Amino acid sequence: MKIHEYQAKEVFASYGLPVDTSIICRSVEDAIKAYNQLDSQKVIVKAQVHTGGRGKAGGVKLANGEVELRKHAAAILGMDIRGFTVDRILVGQAVNIEKEYYVSYVIDRNSKSTLLMLSREGGMDIEEVARTTPEKIHKFVIDPSVGIPDYLAREAAFKLFGDIEQVRQAASIFRKLYRLFVENDASLAEINPLVLTKEGSLMAIDAKMTFDDNALFRHPKIAGLKELTEEEKKEQNAREKGFSYVHLGGDIGCMVNGAGLAMATMDMIKLYGGDPANFLDIGGSSNPTKVIEAMKLLLNDKNVKVVLINIFGGITRCDDVASGLLEAFKQIRTDVPIVIRLTGTNEKEGRAMLQDTHFHVAETMGDATRMAVELTKQFQD
Amino acid sequence: MSILINKDTRLLVQGITGRDGGFHASKMKAYGTNVVAGTSPGKAGESVQDIPVFNTVRDAVKETGANTSVIFVPAPFAKDAMMEAADAGIGLIVCITEGVPTLDVVEAYRFIKSKGANLIGPNCPGLISPGKSMVGIMPTMIFREGGTGVISRSGTLTYEVVYNLTEQGMGQSTAVGVGGDPVVGLYYRELLEMFENDPDTDSIALIGEIGGDAEERAAEYIRAHVTKPVAVFIAGQQAPPGKQMGHAGAIISSGSGTAAEKIAAFEAVGIPVAKEPGQIPSLLKERI
């Protein structure tokens, strides 16, 4: 789960991390009020959206004086950045920057640990730095049973700074940021850039945090900051019913048990010349209620011309799955052709039960996919 | 032979008095797995399907000689269950539970390693050495004894591949579902090494998916260390970036972790990648 920069800065501040002074605004009037409070000739105006690339999109501007601020605030509010409409801007005191650095904690799959990542190449796209000059990124694997002791934080800080005063400031920031990361079950806590001001102090002028969805149950305050797009709301609704759903935009709706098989199904549709409408994993079992709910979800998408149901009957035998499907489709009215592919335990019995119905029954994934793709083509004619 | 589990496996079920724990304990037992004990704090003295229940893993190990554990407890308690098993001397810990916080796994994993034990999962279907032992929730009827080792990040997709293998007369030495989360225990490298060293494994099927770079690392490991034939399938070529595809770990982030990159990594070192799961058996047969 993502939160906005201004929200991340509030979390940072509560852990004693130095952040620039800034005020969140929802209108040009708010921005002018903020300007007067900030008491600084120059201010920075930043769009608050759940996507990167704000700067390139024109969502970050420096304003020198009230007139410029009014102009920038009006331009950025309501702006579209990669499909997100800006409804909030952060107005902050401009900082005198001497140099910019990069600092983050992330989960590293390979070492199965939290990783501290640092670079002197702050303010840049860090993935780009990692690709072109990986030697400019320093990594420290953190042992969860000891965390980041002072010596390790210092060792890390010496990678960025020579001056002991700055090393001490940085080490303190690294330790606080780690505590924040762990205590809130973050999956990313990033400062890019961490700046050294001309006055000699370190300060986070941007803050980015994402959180582990699996751990939100123990962080109700953070969970309360969740803001979903229309698309994400659909996914969330599906999740509440025990499904994983991702909209893809094609015309063959898929219903599959298991995430891996669901991904393989949409890949196969493409391979056979069709377009998958979605990814939908209905989970291990496939009882009638689930199938009904899943069909509602698929048929809600007006682009769907054919539905492909791909079920591997493992612990739930195929004959049970078949009777569940028959039961479910007594309650669903639709003209959309349905292709069903059933494989696994008792598959012959299962398929026989579906044979003389309006379903198109297939034996293999290949057959099922071919059928579904052909049916969409008939539809076009 | 097989890897990780066999006829000597003495299994403990943590969370045996829960609905899933009880159901799957009976399935595992019916398959012939030697299920020796269960745990559920406060329920010592009870039994589930004639399996004795203990309060603690330590008691269960002492009384029954359990050497492997399978965990069915709810996600908020999974870390504690994994650590309890490791602390009591269990050598192989298999965590089925889905939705375990990542930092819980990070912490438990370190602890398990420090005790010299191995972890499989979480968020996995477990593993099976056909004809010997099954630990987890796998549908045993589709498996046959044989020579193909199977490693997979997914559940039903594994069954799909295994089903095809069995249909083509290719049994399995051991099949392991490593789990779909970003951080899990044993992974490709360790399991490839075990299969390479297992005299009864003659070929290996590797089923990967989008997210992370473990497949790329596996390709490099196979090139350098694996002499047995390997065939691969990668799921998620149509996955849009930034979207989690069911599994918490199946996500393309910042443009990396794509299926295309993974397929290219295997092809670059001469390992065949199946276009559809059903091609795996023939790709292996050609090379055995």
Image (cartoon, coloured by chain):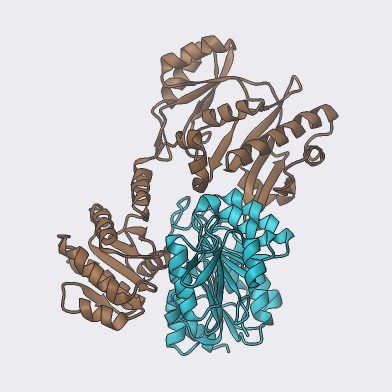
Chain colours: A brown, B cyan
Residue B41: percent from left, percent from top: 55, 55
Pick whichever, A232 or A28, lies toward us. Answer: A232
Residue A230 occupies quadrant = top left
Question: Where's residue A308, x and y in %?
Answer: 28, 67
Q: Residue at x 76, y 34 (%)?
A: A171
Q: Is residue B232 above or below residue A304?
A: below
Asked if one can make out residue A147 in the rendered structure from this viewpoint, the answer is: yes
Query: Looking at this view, is A193 or A174 the one in front?
Result: A174
Task: Place residue A258 in its image quadrant.
Answer: bottom left
Q: Is residue A67 visible?
A: no
Please give the name of the residue rendered at 50% of the width and 88% of the height, measured from the top-left corner.
B170
Assign the C terminus of chain B to one quadrant of the image: bottom right
Q: Quadrant of residue A372?
A: bottom left
From this viewpoint, which residue is outermost toward the front? B45
Compared with A371, B229 (above or below) is below
Q: Which is nearer the eye, A334 or B178?
A: B178
Query: Is A332 on the left-hand or right-hand side of A267?
Result: left
Residue B176 position in % (x across, y down): 55, 72
Residue A106 placed where, x, y %?
63, 46
Above-or-below relation of B172 to B23: below
